Image (tube, rainbow, N blue to C red):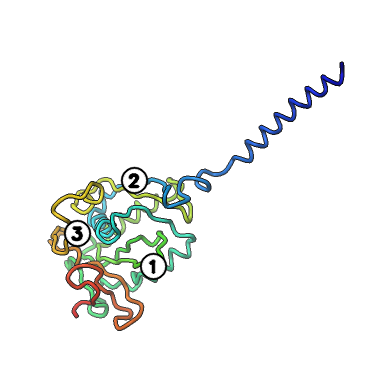
Amino acid sequence: MLQPFISLKALISSVFTFMLLGSFGDATPINARGQGGTRQNPIPVTIDVSKWPNIAEQNCYIMLCLMGRNRVFQRVQTADESERAYTLSGAEWTPFQQRNLIKYHVQQINSQPGRRTETSSAEEFPWRSIHVDPLDPRYVIPATLYEQSMQGNSLSNLYGPNRIDYGNFFHVTFSGYTGPYCRALHSPPTKPDVCDNHFQTILFGVKIMLANFIYALERGGPTRNLFVHMAGDYKGRVWPS
């Protein structure tokens, strides 16, 4: 009677071992095997833009009108890629400072001196922490130093708390917005068409046609190292042309 007892004990032990090993073998980090791993399964994030509403409108315009309502992005693969993006966009050249406007053929939205008024800072979108295909543009738009600082505070908490690792995909939703571009981006298409080149809105205290202030650095050709209009009346050209 001793042998059957040993066999039963061995059987129970084997089953337990199999279950234990199976559990360890399945212990894969969620982001590595599921959410965030592909464009089709991004990590959802909500960003409060109430302290940088004008920059948010610029971001929403680009997502809505130039990127086909796209709100899914991929974090850069490495920290170095983020620094390279700052160079590739031309933002590090500070094109919207008064001394550089003529040199780079760009305009400010508001020229009144002051951190909260003068749009002397270059907002980049997609943000420098977002991976962009080498053939796709990195847009730059004039913004205030104050809103750039407020935006920086918000985005510094974007990746860690949301467990967005390098290379992960995420889906952006803004909250706290008030302008027409963000409203249009976050809702079904409506009339009037805010993507019309001559649609007017107030940004940084000035009534403008935002399409005329979207630029991208041209790295080659006759407009090499100048900022080309990417929308509006001067699309594909430098200002003045």
Question: Which of these two is toward me, 57 or 189?
Answer: 189
User: Outermost residue, bottom direction?
Assistant: 222
Which amino acid, mark 3? Answer: Cys
Numbered disc 1: secondary structure: helix
Say left or right for 167 vs 116.
right
Q: Is residue 171 above or below residue 232?
A: above
Name the residue carrying label 1. 86
Say left or right for 46 vs 5.
left
Name the residue: 17% across, 56% down. 194
Name the residue carrying label 3. 195
- Assess disc 2: are there few (<14), some (14-19) or many (≥20) residues with their C-alpha within 10 Å of its C-alpha: few
Q: Is residue 137 above or below residue 175?
A: below
The residue mark sitting in front, 1 or 3, is 3
Which amino acid, mark 1? Answer: Tyr
**The N terminus appears in which quarter of the rendering?**
top right
Which amino acid, mark 2? Answer: Thr
**Residue 119 position within the rendered picture, expressed as x and y whole percent measured from the top left:** 22, 65
Instruction: Count how many numbered circles sit on residues in the image.
Output: 3
Name the residue: 12% across, 61% down. 207
**Residue 113 position within the rendered picture, expressed as x and y whole percent measured from the top left:** 19, 67
Numbered disc 3: secondary structure: loop
The answer to which of marks 1 and 3 sits earlier in the sequence is: 1
**The C terminus appears in which quarter of the rendering?**
bottom left
Name the residue: 32% across, 62% down. 125
Question: Which of these two is toward me, 9 or 200?
Answer: 9
**Residue 46 numbered mark, or none:** 2
**Residue 208 position within the rendered picture, expressed as x and y whole percent measured from the top left:** 14, 63
